[in-house]
Image (cartoon, rainbow, N blue to C red):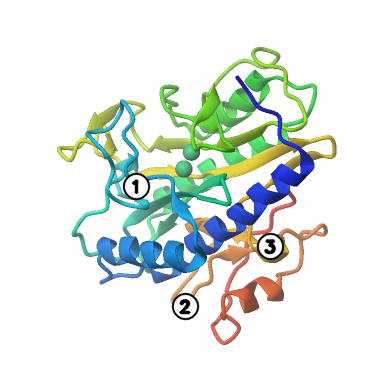
Amino acid sequence: MIELKSAREIDKMAVTGEFVAETLATLSIEAQPGVNVMQLEHQARGLITDRGAKSCYWDYAPSFGRGPFRNVICLSVNDAVLHGKPRDYVLRDGDVLSLDFAVSIDGWVADSAVTVIVGDGADAADRALIDSTRRALDAGIAAAVPGGHLGDISAAIGDVATEAGYRVNAEFGGHGLGRTMHEDPHIANRGRRGRGLLLRAGMTFALEPWWARGSDRLAMDADGWTLRSADGSNTAHSEHTIAITEAGPRILTQLAGGAFVAPAAQRFGAGQVVVGSIDPDGEQADAKACHHFGLLDQRVDAFALHAG
Ligand code: MG
Ligand code: MG
């Protein structure tokens, strides 16, 4: 069953989404060479407690994982792509790190993921990979309009992957969400336009394109959770929670002022900032978003502009 949310309920999900976006932005900035992945986990726990939020991951025990999950964030490094169980690992320059985070606040869930490159040693192919998942997310969001079909979203995402030369695994993808993290429908990252569920205002989805540089097959890590590319190639994952409204798609996992976490492809050097802004003209950085994160005294190299 798919529950249609009222405008007020969507606003509540956006409150949760803002916190999710803030947390991802904060942790993306913290994820520097020499930082242990477990530090990010513990920082996320502290932020959740301070906000009075509830982790959607802690004690989660789905069929695709081994026993209850005892972490609050998924941190997937390099060939790890989904459900990355945080572990004792010190990040290195050039590592590809995906951060996937979902909480509820006042009973409403938001779920988002970003992939960043740690430090300055970005590989051009890794940048292109991350950028493709970001562009696919944008394309999927653009297709999320009343009167369209679920297949329009899936096809829009899959087409970006195919054009960029990546293969799509349709087993894991996006999903409905609201009162809980995983609700109907499943949203495959490839599909056919005009097929599937009729899209209606009030539907809330997490769209999450992910793929690997070399293979669409996955291998389970010995930890019973972390899914890695079967060929060991690097991977990327981008996710937003969105609402379908009569006015079009609305991204709910955004920073205050409409900014959101930009992909590592937008980062250019030390002291980078990983927030971007939604600007109707697509030109101007959002100083408010920087201020929000206390970043005004840092060097701002790049903003990802996103006409959402
Ligand atoms: Mg997620
Ligand atoms: Mg999700």
Mark 1 sits on what residue? 58
- Mark 2, residue position: 271
- Disc 3 and disc 1: Cα gap in Å? 31 Å
Between tags 3 and 1, which lies in front? 1
Mark 1 crowd level (few <14, some 14–19, many ≥20, 10 Å Cα): some
Q: At 69% from the left edge and 31% from the top edge, which residue is drawn?
A: 203
Mark 3 closeness class: few <14, some 14–19, many ≥20 residues within 10 Å: many
Discs 3, 2 touching: Cβ within 8 Å: no
Q: Is residue 57 left or right of residue 153?
A: left
Q: Secondary structure at mark 2?
A: loop
**Horizontal placement of 116 versus 75: left or right?**
right
Q: Is residue 91 left or right of residue 275?
A: left
Residue 171 versus residue 206 in the image, above or below: above
Q: Earlier in the sequence, mark 3 or mark 2?
A: 2
Q: Amino acid at mark 1?
A: Trp
Residue 20: x percent and y percent? 53, 56
Label 1 to label 2, Cα distance in Å?
A: 32 Å
Query: Which residue is disc 3 drawn over?
Result: 277
Residue 73: x, y in percent? Answer: 37, 52
